[in-house]
Image: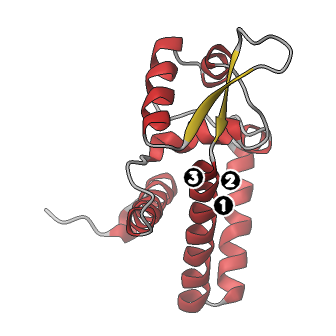
Amino acid sequence: MPVDPQHLDLGSLALFVGQAAAARVQADLDAAGLTGLRIAHGYLFQHLIEEEPTVGELAERMRLTQQAVSKTVAELEGLGYLERVADARDGRIRRIRLTGRGEEAVAAARRFRAGLDDLARARLGDDRVEVTRAVLIDLLDALGGTEPIRLRRVRPPR
């Protein structure tokens, strides 16, 4: 039996819009030659925008096992998005950082998401988009989701 989106709750609608947007960005990244990336990789990338943590630090921040983080880092390293580098003070410690390709992927994803905003503005108009943004921000804050975003500490869904 078909589901009418008019009957969905706000949380489900927001989730489905987010999933559709993420799928579009994923397709755009693939088309741009930035292949092999998954939505889950973005949760790790956020910790590498301004820092070069160790696998252990990433695991702690992401509340995942070191094994899980290590596996993802190795995968992204193999794809050329990340690299392990020696710590400046202690060469035995390996830090994780974005490569040029990783930085390119971050910049491209940002461009593609901005394109989705442009699509929304073209379809809905500036006023409706700004009202929608304000409503979503208010709901995000009411649900306690604002601070993790500000701190780049958004956790992957369970």
Q: Residue 51 location, x and y as percent?
A: 78, 34
How many C-alpha atoms fall within 10 Å of the one at disc 1: few (<14), some, or many (≥20)? some
Most extreme residue toward the left is 1
Along the line of sight, the residue nearer the viewer: 98 or 148: 98
Q: How many marks?
A: 3
Q: Residue 97 location, x and y as percent?
A: 67, 35
Res. 86 in view: yes
How many C-alpha atoms fall within 10 Å of the one at disc 2: few (<14), some, or many (≥20)? some
For the point 47% across and 13% down, which residue is it?
Answer: 67
State the image quarter where residue 119 is shown.
bottom right
- Label of residue 139 in the image: 2
Residue type, numbered disc 1: Leu
- Label of residue 101 in the image: 3
Q: Residue 74 location, x and y as percent?
A: 46, 27
Please say if the residues under marks 2 and 1 sit with CB atoms less than 8 Å apart: yes
Q: Earlier in the sequence, mark 3 or mark 1?
A: 3
Q: Earlier in the sequence, mark 3 or mark 2?
A: 3
- Name the residue carrying label 1: 136
Res. 144 in view: no
**Nearer the observer, disc 3 or disc 2?**
3
Using the numbered discs, state the Cα–Cα distance from disc 2 to disc 1 in whole angstroms. 5 Å
State the image quarter where residue 86 is shown.
top right
Height in image: 73 above or below 23?
Answer: above
